[in-house]
Image (tube, rainbow, N blue to C red):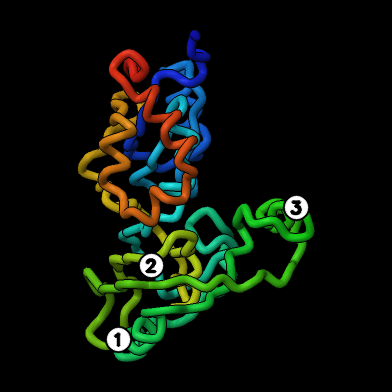
Amino acid sequence: MSIPRALRPVGVALVDKPAGPSSFAIVATLRRRTRARTGHAGTLDPFATGLLVLLSGAATRLAPCFVGLDKRYVTDVDLTSTTTTGDPEGEIVERHPAPPRSALDEALAGLRGEVELPIPAASAVKIGGERAYRLSRRGVEVDMPLRRSLVHALDVITYDGDPTTVSSVRLELHVSSGTYVRAIAGALGGHCTTLRRVAVGPFRIEEAAPVENAVLLRAGPALERLPPEAVEKVPEPVLAGVLALDTPAGNGSAA
């Protein structure tokens, strides 16, 4: 029996997203290269850069294995102002003096471990059946729900400022899936000026390439790198069906 064209090539692409295009534009670029069904295992905001895990062909059925993986980021946070979006694309809401380093360190300590933070208004979460970012663009104010996240690590790379205060800080984060780094910046009284995802589960940015040059990893070896509890999120018959197509003939190339 012939295999539907949309299911081939099968594989996982590790893409280094640049600032500017949306994650969905990157997905569309890979789809045009492969002419196969293409999905993602978690998006990045347009201003953000870094690792996108894309799934090609029959591997799109494996999305539940990848979407819940921990993420690692590096971000620069301006501590002297907040914006409507929590990033440089929004309008300034408030300007305030740079905090003392001791106050910043105390705030960071309170954001490690299990935390509950409001979801940013400029997000894709649905409020009353409509995307929050669409409501925000129309100026509709809503009470955003809290999201519980696990911050495994929140470390300072560099402090910037004068001897007594910190105007901006570069942070390295290891967080559970679904954590909004913009919300952490907001809790510090600032906003993200840069954001780069450097890892998704076991996959590192060093393995990634621009979408125009990204190659497809075989689905089987990619799954072997995941923890067992992640792989178990896909029913065994579905997993077997994908792996049956994960052959050199079924994989093809992303060219």
User: Dot 1: within a 10 Å radius of its alpha carbon, few (fewer than 14), some, or many (20 or more) residues?
Assistant: some
x and y percent of residue 198 in the render?
A: 29, 52
Mark 3 or mark 2, earlier in chain: 2
Residue beneath the point at 38% across and 67% down: 77
Image disc number at residue 130: 3
| Labels 3 and 1 touching (C-beta < 8 A) | no
Amino acid type shown at disc 3: Glu
Task: Return the disc, 3 or 1, that comes first in the chain's sequence.
Answer: 1
Which residue is painted at 31% across and 27% down in the image? Answer: 216
The image shows residue 55, relative to residue 141, as above or below, that is above
Seen from the viewer's position, the closer of residues 164 and 242 is 242
Q: Residue lying farthest top?
A: 2
Report which residue position mark 2 lands on: 77
Q: Which residue position holds label 1?
A: 101
Q: Quadrant of the C terminus?
A: top left
Mark closest to the chain's N terminus, 1 or 2: 2
